[in-house]
Image (spheres, rainbow, N blue to C red):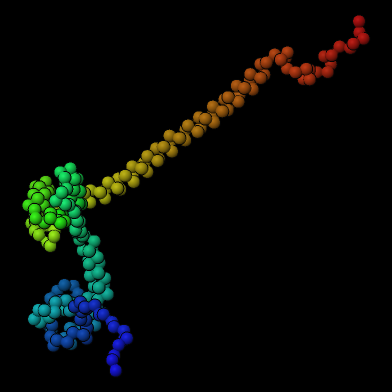
């Protein structure tokens, strides 16, 4: 009966495990105390007893030495600090991508110039560039044309790139691989350092600008209210200065009318 259909598990290779306390099997170890002082070579039982007295762990920090080096410390804090260091190193590492530019032996000079500008842009961003010239049909009979194109590209980017792989035939293609020079990575690192304080400065300047605008607008609003009050007062005064003839007849007092039958 054939065996099959079972679930297969792929285990990832485990890294070196840190041995602590009773997992340390060697008879004697060189012990470093919690304050950094060297306690010398002790038996493993003595080292464990000393770690228990201070309420800490006995951690093997260098298993390859003879005898292994162990340190008395807080293992939880030790793991946290190691993980923090790994994250910091991973954040600072530079990821280099390989960009690919494709050309043909029949590519004219103007298009080659456009490709060169794209290559320079990729390299200045910190990426490697692979330039591939593909042959079709009988173009394979004239590889010198592709050789001339790739050599031209190398001469135009020589100030910022190093050639990692010279132009070489790969099946029906000729490939060239270039990488940024160290000066490019230095410029990128300097630009990244300069970018952080500039961002903070922009935030402060924006806040100051907002405060200044508010301070400028506040007195303008008060002046507008005063102007409105002055305008209303002037309008009332103008109405009071109008002659009585301009007022409608309905506003005249009743006693001002004369009787009609009086001679």
Looking at the image, residue 206 sits to the left or right of residue 17; the answer is: right
Residue 160 in the image: state x and y as whole percent. 12, 49
Which of 137 and 111 lies nearest the eye of the viewer? 137
Looking at the image, residue 23 sits to the left or right of residue 212; the answer is: left
The quadrant holding residue 90 is bottom left
Point 22% across, 70% down: residue: 82
Q: Is residue 22 above or below residue 256?
A: below
Q: Residue furthest bottom?
A: 1
Quadrant that contains the N terminus: bottom left
The answer to whether one can see residue 181 in this image is: no
Point 11% across, 79% down: residue: 64
Point 19% across, 75% down: residue: 34
Residue 190 in the image: state x and y as whole percent. 19, 50
The answer to whether one can see residue 192 in this image is: yes
Which of 175 and 230 lies nearest the eye of the viewer? 175
Which of 163 and 33 lies nearest the eye of the viewer? 163
Point 86% across, 11% down: residue: 258
Q: Is residue 87 above or below residue 250?
A: below
The quadrant holding residue 263 is top right
Residue 201 in the image: state x and y as whole percent. 30, 45
Q: Is residue 162 above or below residue 72?
A: above
């Amino acid at each position: 009966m054939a065996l099959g259909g079972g679930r297969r598990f792929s285990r990832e290779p485990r890294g070196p495990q840190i041995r602590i306390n009773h997992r340390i099997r060697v008879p004697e170890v060189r012990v470093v105390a919690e304050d950094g002082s060297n306690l010398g070579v002790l038996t493993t039982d003595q080292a464990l007893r000393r770690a228990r007295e201070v309420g800490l762990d006995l951690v093997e920090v260098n298993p390859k030495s003879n005898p292994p080096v162990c340190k008395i410390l807080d293992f939880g804090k030790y793991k946290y600090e190691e993980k923090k260091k790994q994250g910091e190193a991973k954040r600072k590492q530079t990821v280099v991508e390989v960009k690919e530019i494709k050309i043909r032996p029949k590519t004219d000079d103007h298009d080659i110039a456009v490709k060169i500008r794209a290559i320079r842009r990729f390299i200045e961003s910190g990426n490697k560039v692979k330039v591939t010239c593909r042959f079709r049909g009988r173009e394979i009979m004239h590889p010198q044309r592709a050789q001339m194109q790739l050599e031209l590209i190398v001469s135009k980017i020589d100030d910022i790139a190093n050639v990692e792989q010279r132009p070489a035939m790969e099946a029906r293609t000729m490939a060239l691989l270039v990488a940024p020079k160290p000066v490019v990575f230095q410029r990128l690192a300097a630009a990244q350092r300069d970018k952080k304080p500039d961002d903070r400065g922009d935030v402060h300047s924006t806040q100051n600008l907002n405060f200044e605008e508010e301070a400028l607008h506040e007195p303008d609003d008060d002046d507008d209210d005063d102007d409105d009050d002055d305008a209303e007062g002037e309008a009332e005064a103008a109405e009071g200065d109008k002659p009585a003839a301009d007022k409608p007849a309905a506003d005249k007092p009743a006693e001002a009318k004369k009787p009609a039958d009086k001679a």
